[in-house]
Image (cartoon, rainbow, N blue to C red):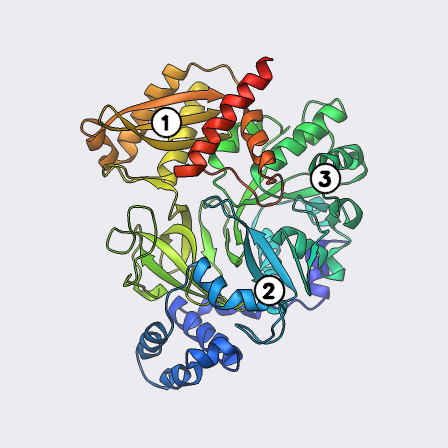
Amino acid sequence: MAILGTLLKKGIRLREMLEEEYTSPGDLQKKELKELLMTASGTEFGKHYHFPSILKSFRKGGHEYYRQYKNSVPLHTYDKMYSDWWKLSLRGVKDVCWPGRVKYFALSSGTSESASKYIPVTKDMTKAIQKTSVRQILTLSKYDLPPSVFTSGIMMLGGSTHLNKRGSVFEGDLSGIQAARLPFWFQHFYKPGKKIAKNRNWDAKLDEIAAKAKEWDIGIIVGVPAWLQILMGKIIEYHKVKTIHDVWPNLLVYVHGGVSFDPYRKGFEKLLGRPIHYIETYLASEGFIAFQAFPNRRSMRLVLNNGIFYEFIPFESKNFDANGDILPDAETLMIDEVEEGKEYAILLSSCAGAWRYLIGDTIKFVSKEEAEIVITGRTKHFLSLCGEHLSVDNMNKAIELVADELNVAIPEFTVAGIPFENLFAHNWYVGTDNEVDAKVLKEKIDGHLKVLNDDYAVERSAALKDIHVEVLPLKTFYAWMESKGKVGGQNKFPRVLKNTQLADWQSFIQNFSNGNRS
């Protein structure tokens, strides 16, 4: 039963896709905000911030509706959104930020903070995520794929679908929540299936999948690169074969997201028997934000007409402090006010009851007309101890270039800024199982960063006195994640470590190293 044919037979409407093709981004977003405000106008949040009054301004011309909206509703970090509103929904109160009761909460800590965040997942958000997933599947028709892909299964490696009950609500990984509520028509294609997906023991789950892998004809795999790479390695080892294509000969598509794929590419491709198509997605705990809509483009198109209204904050010192925290009077822009090539932090207002909510990611527009973006990092994941303004995007690119030059796989790394000789230095912790000289790594990383980032080059001859590189086995990174209860699902290792997280990591690697030697 072909998946594309099934979608069409089930009457999946393409209207929204056509609407996005033939309507300007600004018009789509104006309509989306209006619908969100109308739906939530009777909620406690809507009453408190006078949504009916804001809605009247939509009759006026220009951006008056947006001026009213941002003047009425303040910016929200997670702490503000939760303490003022979401904690009530978590207690079972209805009609707080979105109509009805919220039954599901996604647990997310991102990669910056250690404490779990509770992100509401409403029925409308679940439907929106499913609808955007369908849109992404339909874009496969643009790729030169054989018919076998559309009759194959889809391996979705996510969090456990076994959710924890907390009072009157359920909590868990977003991927687990979504997998537990898959539409009936999709379950024919979904692997590893409901029984295995429920398993909360990550290692046991991977072992079960590895054992049953040959029973499934998999054409598409979906998941965070680090964990899928581990799974494919287990499958290859279990079945004593050379590549994953010896087990899944029809595998042709990898849908990835959550973290830049570039550092994983070389190691990932060593597990393959032949090239496959890579399709990037931007599925956050707060919603399905964007996906790669065109082959051979390393960019994603924002989903502008499916339950999310976006605002963009120039990622500059006038809007964020040195720690990456947003300033109260930060400048916010609509999608028709942004510039290509400039870095922005994203605010979301959504059908999950998030309002002017800072999700912590930074992006750049590569095409304003097509609303195409690339993710560049996190508001708190950058280093600027002395004005070097080093972004995660810079770091990823440098690691990719070094890995290619040395023909090694460097799937994991993290960086910290430290005091050094009365000035500053960067500490790099590089994860690889290949033999590599730390001195060579240091020279090459430093050299590439000087080319990629002018500010970095200037500071390397001034206040940024040195960079230090420590090479660690990959298992060190994964063991640290396991020690935090963050294996599998959408969990990923932080690319920048600061403050207590850095101290914790340094203590861990010392103990882990000593433990391995004994």
Which is nearer the N-term, disc 2 or disc 1?
Answer: 2
**Residue placed under numbered mark 1 in the picture:** 427
- Density class for disc 1 (Cα within 10 Å; few <14, some 14-19, many ≥20) is some
Visible residue check, residue 268:
no
Mark 2 residue type: Leu
Visible residue check, residue 477:
yes
Which is nearer the N-term, disc 3 or disc 1?
Answer: 3
Residue 48 image position (x, y, % from top left) = 44, 79
Residue 144 image position (x, y, % from top left) = 59, 45
Which is nearer the N-term, disc 2 or disc 3?
Answer: 2
Mark 1 residue type: Asn
> Based on the displayed image, in which of its 4 quarters is residue 384 positioned?
top left
Q: Point out the image quarter for the N terminus.
A: bottom right
Q: Point out the image quarter for the C terminus.
A: top right
476 displayed left or right of 338: right
Helix, strand or loop at mark 1:
strand
**Residue placed under numbered mark 2 in the picture:** 90
Helix, strand or loop at mark 3:
loop
> Based on the displayed image, in which of its 4 quarters is residue 334 positioned?
bottom left
**Residue placed under numbered mark 3 in the picture:** 201
CA separation in Å, label 3 and label 1: 34 Å
Residue shown at 53%/40% (left/top)? Answer: 492
